[in-house]
Amino acid sequence: MAQLTYGVIRGERAFDAYCQRRWKQRARFCESFAHIEDVTVERFYEKSPTDDGYTEYFLMTMPTNRDTGLCWHNDIATMVKREISEGTVKLIK
């Protein structure tokens, strides 16, 4: 089974800037999901202890050759949403 790695970005501006730097294009969403090359992106709203209210986050999952123990986008999403609500998520800048 393919191993996945992931990254999380807070806010649309930061996400768009990251995509422009990394892929020289923007993600095109259909509902809450988008794809850029072999990356699956999910847009969702969650509240961390430092957010004033629910804030837009972007979860990117992508294949990797490393053994991460992570194989399913939904499992990663559940973990990331819990980390955001607990204030322990590591964000990409």
Image (spheres, rainbow, N blue to C red):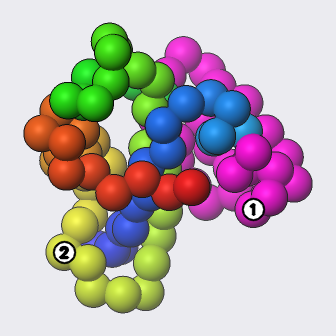
Residue farthest top in this picture: 53
Q: Earlier in the sequence, mark 1 or mark 2?
A: 1
Q: Is residue 82 visible?
A: no
Q: In this view, does 86 lie to the left or right of 81?
A: left
Could you tell me residue 76's position as x and y percent?
Answer: 25, 51
Q: Mark 1 points at which residue?
A: 22
Residue 28 falls within the magenta-colored stretch: yes
**Picture residue at 45% right of the left edge, 78% below the top:** 64
> Would you identify the image quadrant in which residue 24 lies?
bottom right
> Would you identify the image quadrant in which residue 37 lies?
bottom right
Q: In this view, does 42 lie to the left or right of 29?
A: left
- Frontmost of labels 1 and 2 is 1
Q: Is residue 19 visible?
A: yes
**Picture residue at 72% right of the left edge, 39% below the top:** 16
**Picture residue at 28% right of the left edge, 30% below the top:** 50
Could you tell me residue 2's position as x and y percent?
Answer: 35, 73
Indicate which disc residue 45 carries: none
Q: How crowded is mark 1: few (under 14 residues within 10 Å), some or many (20 or more)?
A: few
Q: Is residue 59 left or right of residue 36?
A: left
Describe the element under mark 1 as helix, strand or loop: helix
Residue 75 falls within the magenta-colored stretch: no
Q: Which of 65 and 17 is in front in this view?
A: 17
Find the magenta span and give its range: 17-42
Looking at the figure, which quarter contains the C terminus? bottom right
Q: Which amino acid does label 2 sit on?
A: Gly
Could you tell me residue 68's position as x and y percent?
Answer: 26, 78
Find the distance from the CA under tag 1 to the CA under tag 2: 25 Å
> Would you identify the image quadrant in which residue 3 lies?
bottom left
Q: Name the residue under label 2.
A: 69
Could you tell me residue 47's position as x and y percent?
Answer: 26, 23
Task: Answer above or below: position of 27 versus 75.
Answer: above
Residue farthest bottom in this picture: 66
